[in-house]
Amino acid sequence: MKLWNHYHTPHSVDEAIDMLTRYAGQAKIVAGGTDLLVDMRAEYHGPHEALVDVTRIPDMAAITRDGDTITLGAGATHAQIVKSADLRANATCLVEGCGVIGGPQVRNVGTIGGNVAHALPAGDGTTSLVALDAEAEVIKDGIRQWLPIRDLFRGAGQSLLDSSRDLLIRFRFQPTTSGQATAFARIMRPQGVALPVLGCAVWVSVADGKFTGARVCVAPSAPIPMRAEDVEEVLLGAPANAESIEAAITTAQATLKLRTSKYRATADYRYEMVAVLLRKTLTKAVERAETGAAVPEGV
Ligand SMILES: Cc1cc2nc3c(=O)[nH]c(=O)nc-3n(C[C@H](O)[C@H](O)[C@H](O)COP(=O)(O)OP(=O)(O)OC[C@H]3O[C@@H](n4cnc5c(N)ncnc54)[C@H](O)[C@@H]3O)c2cc1C
């Protein structure tokens, strides 16, 4: 089965955009190909005219720090993210999320940009980027711009970006500082691939024994990855203890719209599991914020 006619490997963002423009919608961006090639085989409509491989663009693979901003290239692989000392210490939830994606083969080639651009409601790297309140640099309709990550999602599997024309270049977010920490956990069917039964990433800020900030992403809880704002509100200003975490869980169970999905879990099971995941991640994040020691689990 022939999947494409031409394969290009541009070495700069400008070159990639020139190629996409020349193909006028007939080419498709590919990164690790771990989502795209599965989809192309499953929905075969004949070969694509061209694939534009963005993994040879050095800028898009870099993980850099400039003061209080971490910049993460969309082409960075999950394996690269797991190895980054800065991300392990200061964006721990992202390392924990990317560290459980697929197996080593998938993590060695699959990218964070592909995870986000695929726009599934519960991509593990995406869930953590939402809790980190990341912004994304994109070229959309020819205009290079920074957008809040939430603006990239239009529906389940539907991105703002047309991946035959628009490019996701990089992400940026603030690393955790003193009194702040993050955590990620998920529940996956043992034989499951690709998406979890439920995933949860949290960011907390703790001072004088109280939550001075909280960001929570439980996914899937909607067609797009989104923050659980009612849960965040319950935590804000509350003592950073088990009682407040139980109150957050009660609010999550009352306000999140968890649904039954044919291949993964019933809504009832997800309502039970949201308690397990929030208890685990919030307790861990508070402990990390208070001790200043963040060692990613499971990776
Ligand atoms: C066996 C297996 C297990 C998996 N397990 C998990 C899992 O546990 N958790 C999970 O979240 N995912 C999982 N996945 C899904 C997949 O590996 C990830 O979503 C991965 O991050 C996709 O990245 P990629 O680079 O391979 O994307 P690709 O497949 O190359 O691209 C995906 C989509 O994004 C577009 N795209 C890619 N890069 C860009 C860019 N820079 N700009 C614009 N558009 C772009 C492509 O055109 C395509 O539409 C699994 C996949 C497999 C095959």
Image (cartoon, helix red, strand yellow):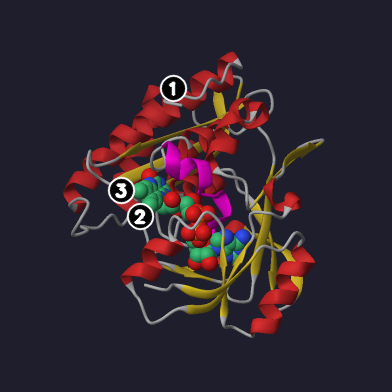
Q: How far across and how far down the image is residue 9, in percent?
A: 66, 62
Q: Which mark is residue 193?
A: 3
Above or below 281: residue 6: below
Please name the residue shown 35% across and 76% down the image: 44
Residue 282 percent coordinates (x, y): 44, 30
- Label 2 to label 1, Cα distance in Å? 25 Å
Assess whether residue 105 is covered by the magenta stretch: yes
Above or below: residue 186 compared with residue 55: above
Magenta-drawn segment: 104-117
Query: Residue lying furthest right in this view?
Result: 67
Q: On the rendered structure, is 154 left or right of 261?
A: right
Residue visible at 40% across and 58% down in the picture? 121
2 or 3: mark nearer the eye: 3
Does the beta carbon at disc 3 come under 8 Å from ligand 1? Answer: yes
Secondary structure under tag 3 reads: loop
Q: Which residue, given by chain and number where applicable, does mark 1 sit on?
A: 241
Task: Provide residue 206's location: percent of width, then percent of height.
Answer: 59, 26
User: Could you tell me the amino acid type at mark 1?
Assistant: Asn
Query: In the picture, residue 63 is in which quadrant?
Result: top right
Of residues 187 and 73, which is closer to you in this image? 73
Magenta stretch secondary structure, dominant: helix
Q: Amino acid at mark 2?
A: Ser
Sort mark 2 into few (<14), some (14-19) or many (20+) by Cα contacts within 10 Å: many
Residue 215 spot, x, y in % from top left? 53, 42
| Residue carrying label 2 | 221
Residue 115 seen anywhere in this rendered image of the structure: no
Q: Earlier in the sequence, mark 2 or mark 1?
A: 2
